[in-house]
Image (spheres, rainbow, N blue to C red):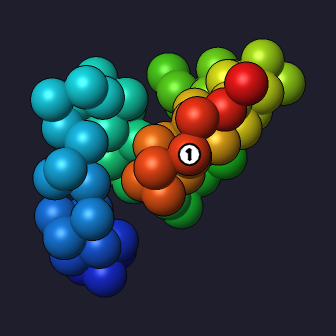
Amino acid sequence: MSAALAYARRHFAPFQHAHMRDIQQLMACLLYASRPLSDSPYGHLLSVSALQDAIVDFVREACNTHGQVRG
């Protein structure tokens, strides 16, 4: 778990202003690492719509990072 925290501190900082709530929820999921996430208050993060939203966000951020406009 300490590796996950170190990773988050190193890589999530640039996104904290726009995505703080999402980052907080993802970090709270670590509390359920030894139990099924679906049984936690964060089970909604496993939904199909959450995955689709993550894909859209990832593509948008990747395009922005590389100076490309997604049409």
Residue 54 appears in view: no
Dot 1: few (<14), some (14–19), or many (≥20) neighbours within 10 Å?
few
Residue pointed to by mark 1: 68
| SS at circle 1 | loop
Return the x and y of residue 25 as percentages of the image width and height.
37, 32
Left/right of residue 32 with respect to residue 5 in the rendered view:
right
Question: Above or below — where is 70 with respect to 65?
Answer: above
Quarter-of-image position of residue 51: top right
Return the x and y of residue 48 as percentages of the image width and height.
84, 24
Residue 50 appears in view: yes
Left/right of residue 3 with respect to residue 38 in the rendered view:
left
Return the x and y of residue 17 as percentages of the image width and height.
15, 29
Return the x and y of residue 41 as percentages of the image width and height.
50, 22
In depth, the one of 71 and 37 nearer the eye is: 71
Q: Of the residues shown, which amino acid type is indicated by label 1?
A: Gln
Quarter-of-image position of residue 23: top left
Residue at 71%, 38% in the rendered image = 55
Residue at 58%, 35% in the rendered image = 69
In depth, the one of 59 and 30 nearer the eye is: 59
In depth, the one of 7 and 34 nearer the eye is: 7
